[in-house]
């Protein structure tokens, strides 16, 4: 079980330099923390608040769902961090911000409400590639049939099985299995990586089929399910 003192010591330099943000949250009695990066919006170079990426928004929302008292701090905006103060004072301040909530000033929920979400260069590239794949798929489909494209539920079909048997499908299954294990072990870094990968696959599946697919995980089941509540696949 991680202690708050150990986490504050680990992220002390990040809290002091005031460039990045550090999010703190609890699961049960255990403390957790991670660095959060903001983005630069080239279309609006001087926003009131630095924007965040789509992946960062989803990650913070996941943290907030686990702990609605989660806080996010930055040394530039939180002037109570001083280099010459003992570590105990830093720990006391972080604990105070968490327990008092400071009228929501440092809550993750407030942080999300104040920030625009922008597409990173990677997001733009992924979307461009997804659009290109979609256009190629539409051209191929148009050559084979003239009727208007409709939603296609590929679960429990030959088409769906071909996808799962492909290299991409195998990578998706592996990613979901890794994500499930990471969530079980509380490995937030690995969970974030898996979430980022799934976001791209989710967009691709929707472009190809017109149906939304979701990562679903309960105590007894885990896998990918669509808006019709049909499983594309389950790992358990």
Image (cartoon, rainbow, N blue to C red):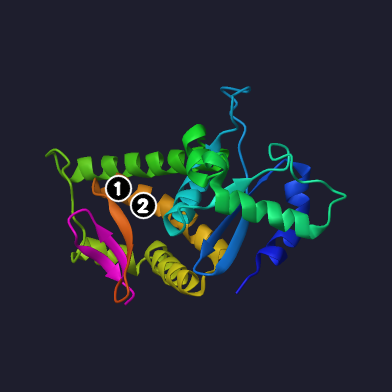
Q: Is residue 42 above or below residue 182?
A: above
Report if residue 38 is visible in the image.
yes
Q: Secondary structure at mark 1?
A: helix
- Left or right of 130 in this view: 52: right
Quarter of the image where one finds residue 47 = top right
- Left or right of 84 in this view: 91: left
Residue at the location (51% across, 74% down)?
Answer: 185
Single out the residue that lies furthest toward the left: 147
Q: Is residue 157 above or below residue 116?
A: below
- Specify start and end residues of the magenta stretch as a single range: 222-236
Residue at the location (61% across, 49% down)?
Answer: 97
| Image x and y of residue 118, in percent | 51, 34
Mark 1 vs 2: CB contact within 8 A: yes
Q: Which mark is residue 145?
A: none
Which is more toward the observer, 116 or 227?
116
Is the residue marked by circle 1 packed among few (<14), some (14-19), or many (20+) residues within 10 Å?
A: some
Quarter of the image where one finds residue 142 = top left
Quarter of the image where one finds residue 45 = top right
Residue at the location (72% across, 41% down)?
Answer: 19
The residue singled out by tag 1 in the image is 206
- Left or right of 147 in this view: 158: right
Total marks in image: 2
Q: Secondary structure at mark 2?
A: helix
- Left or right of 236 in this view: 192: right
The residue singled out by tag 2 in the image is 202
Which is more toward the observer, 109 or 152?
109
């Amino acid at each position: 079980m991680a202690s708050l003192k150990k986490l504050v010591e680990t992220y002390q330099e990040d809290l002091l330099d005031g460039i990045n943000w550090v999010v703190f949250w609890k699961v049960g009695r255990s403390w957790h923390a991670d660095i959060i990066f903001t983005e630069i919006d080239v279309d609006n170079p001087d926003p009131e608040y630095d924007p965040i990426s789509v992946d960062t928004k989803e990650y913070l929302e996941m943290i907030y769902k686990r702990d609605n008292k989660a806080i996010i701090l930055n040394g530039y905006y939180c002037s109570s961090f001083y280099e010459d103060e003992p570590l105990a004072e830093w720990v006391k301040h972080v604990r105070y911000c968490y327990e008092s909530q400071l009228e929501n000033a440092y809550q993750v929920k407030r942080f999300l409400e104040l920030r625009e979400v922008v597409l990173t260069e990677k997001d733009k590239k992924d979307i461009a590639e997804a659009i290109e794949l979609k256009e190629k798929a539409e051209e191929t489909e148009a050559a084979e049939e003239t009727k208007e494209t409709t939603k296609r539920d590929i679960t429990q079909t030959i088409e769906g099985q071909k996808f799962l048997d492909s290299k991409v499908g195998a990578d998706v299954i592996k990613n979901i299995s890794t994500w499930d294990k990471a969530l079980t072990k509380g490995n937030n870094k690995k969970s974030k990586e898996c979430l980022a990968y799934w976001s791209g696959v989710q967009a691709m599946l929707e472009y190809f089929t017109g149906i939304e697919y979701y990562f679903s995980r309960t105590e007894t089941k885990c896998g990918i399910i669509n808006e019709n509540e049909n499983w594309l696949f389950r790992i358990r």
